[in-house]
Amino acid sequence: QVQLVESGGVLVQAGGSLRLSCTASGNFVSDNAIAWYRQLTGKQREFIARVARDGSALLADSVRRRFAASRDSANKVVFLQMSRLKPEDTGIYYCNVPSPAMWNQPMASWGKGTQVTVSA
């Protein structure tokens, strides 16, 4: 099974920005819609963004004013651009293939995710 790999998470100060990346082998990223999820400290994993194959993006209400999602021009990488980060954004961020019917339901195995830590 194809493995999705997240990267880019680091320790950042509140108010800062980060760009996360999601990649996979072959044409998996270009052939599928890709969604971003996060598991905040002490909470369940939640859907936060979906990038369609054509690059159009939809973000959850909780992040839409601060985050953006996109694909690179080669359609090999899906990004999550995060700005004005808050300590409550601290958690593990994952990408996956969202179910067409329910975007909060993943269709692939979870990767390791990437840890984002926002200090006050």
Image (cartoon, rainbow, N blue to C red):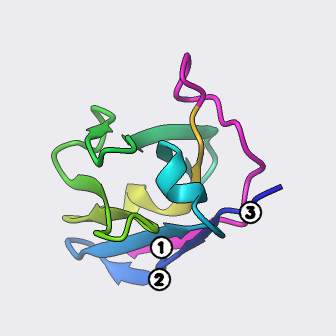
* Image quarter of residue 67: bottom left
> In the rendered view, does 2 fall on the left or right side of 52?
right
Whether residue 100 is in magenta: the answer is yes
Taking depth in this image into account, of 120 and 48 the one nearest to the observer is 48
Looking at the image, which residue is at 16% across and 45% down? 65
At mark 3, the secondary structure is loop
Q: Amino acid at mark 3?
A: Gln
Judging by the rendered image, the residue that carries numbered circle 3 is 3
x and y, in percent, of residue 84 in the image: 19, 64
Who comes first in sequence, dot 3 or dot 1? 3
Q: Are marks 1 and 2 in contact (CB under 8 Å)?
A: yes
Location of residue 19 (image quadrant): bottom left
Q: x and y percent of residue 51 in the render?
A: 37, 45
Q: Position of residue 105 (x, y in %)?
A: 64, 29
Q: What amino acid is found at the position of numbered circle 1 in the picture?
A: Thr
Dots 2 and 3: beta carbons under 8 Å? no
Q: Do the CB atoms of the residues marked 3 and 1 lie less than 8 Å apart?
A: no
Outermost residue, left side: 65
Quarter of the image where the C terminus is located? bottom left
- In the rendered view, does 43 fall on the left or right side of 85? right
The magenta-colored residue range is 99-119
Q: Which residue carries the number 1 mark?
A: 117
